[in-house]
Amino acid sequence: MITKEWVLAALRPVADPRFEQSLVEMQWIRDVMVKENRISLTVVTADLSDDMKSRLDNEIKARLTQAGAVELHVRYREASDSEREKVGLPPANGANDNEVGPGGGSLKGHGVGLEKLPLMDPASGVTFIAVASGKGGVGKSTITANLAVALARQGKRVGLIDADIYGFSIPDMMGIEEAPQVEDGVIMPVERFGVKVMSMGFFVRENNPVIWRGPMLGRMLRQFLADVNWGELDFLLLDLPPGTGDVALDVHQMLPQTKEIIVTTPHATAAFVAARAGAMALQTDHELLGVVENMAYYECSSCGERDYIFGRGGGARLAETLHTELLAQVPLGAPDNHLSEPDFSPSVYKADTKTAAIFAETAAHIIEKCKKD
């Protein structure tokens, strides 16, 4: 039977072509997933050239195929400077000074190490919370936005990074129409409902797609941390892309102290896929705060009866699998907001609604959990 340990043992002789060190011993073979005879994994490498990738690809596939693997899926990403440092390699040359983001801004950043930022100092008291899901379409961004607002309504200083760089949606969900300003070379986040927000959506014109490779995503996330004037915060939430891709890995490397919330629906398949995101958090020593089950039921506005449209129990089973708790069950619905209202937003629930009360209770519980750490 093929297992993760078997895969790592088979690949132990595979060395990074430039530095001649075992990728397994460098811990540069990541995200190994095995299902029957199908294997998927990520290879971290110091050189993403086509020639190097081809050489690694041929050796990896040859070794695993010879040992009995039927179907292989190998992804590649460039090693970060911190990953290079851990194995004694020199840092990369860094971003090209001429690279620009979709809005024309430089991606070079200030060159400040993240560990030197006041935001990253443990004495700052900032709690980082990443909101993740195994797949798209489960309402992860809706949960993130409403949880951020709920924390702010309880008097907390809250920041929110829309780290779903391909599928950014937070500005639209929160009804944000203005763009961030730059003061003295530093980006000022846009504040809405008491939450300071930063998103790729502010820099993309007319909803154009973001067509970037993995390393550029990490640089943008780094810029959101280093070049934004967040001020003093109690909580900084990160709305991660679904799955366990490059941005999620960058968050795990840049912010090792991050806590995580996993979002799922009650459907068994959604919960099964979400377990991968939870497993990634556990494997990288991130604390799981719990699971939020979205679209848990539909409540009739007339009679109050509940219909469990997507089934029942997925969130509870996921929480049990990950040895954490079910934080909340949020009903299927949409805020009753109107364009004529000054505080209009498509996705943020008003404070006096039943759903907002669920988020308020969840936020209070999270505040208490974080106090105990």
Image (cartoon, helix red, strand yellow):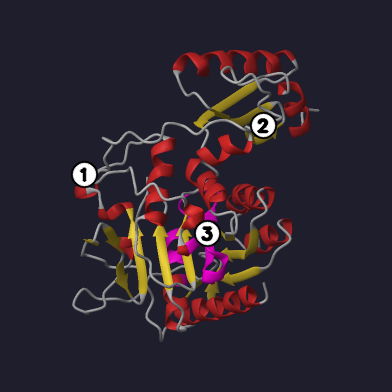
Q: Amino acid at mark 2?
A: Met
Image quadrant in which you'd find residue 244: top right
Which residue is denoted by mark 2 in the rendering? 26
Against 140, residue 14 (above or below) is above
User: Was residue 137 drawn as part of the magenta stretch in this picture?
Assistant: yes
The first of marks 3 and 1 along the sequence is: 1
Q: Which comes before the other along the chain, label 3 or label 2?
A: 2
Residue 311, percent from left and from top: 59, 60
Q: From the viewer's perspective, is the residue at label 3 or at label 1 nearer? A: 1
Asked if 98 appears above or below 236 in the picture, the reply is above
Pointers 2 and 1 in contact (CB under 8 A)?
Answer: no
Looking at the rendered structure, the secondary structure element under dot 1 is: loop
Residue 184 x %, y %: 24, 61
According to the picture, the residue beneath numbered tag 1 turns out to be: 104
| Comes first in the chain, label 2 or label 1 | 2
Residue 151 in the figure: left or right of residue 185: right
| Residue 312: x %, y % from top left | 63, 63
Task: Give the alpha-carbon distance from disc 2 to disc 1, as whole Å.
Answer: 37 Å
Q: Which residues are magenta?
A: 119-147
The amino acid beneath tag 1 is Gly
Q: Are there few (<14), some (14-19), or many (20+) residues within 10 Å of tag 1?
A: few
Locate the N terminus by quadrant: top right
The correct choice, above or below, for 154 with respect to 78 in the image is: below
In the picture of the structure, the residue carrying the numbered disc 3 is 130
Residue 166, given in percent of the width and then of the height, sits at: 37, 45
Q: Residue at position x 66%, y 35% from top? A: 33
Q: Is 339 situated left or right of 305 in this image? A: left
Q: Nearer the viewer, residue 168 or 199?
A: 199
Q: Residue at x 45, y 79 (%)?
A: 356
| Residue nearest the observer in this picture, 118 or 187 | 118
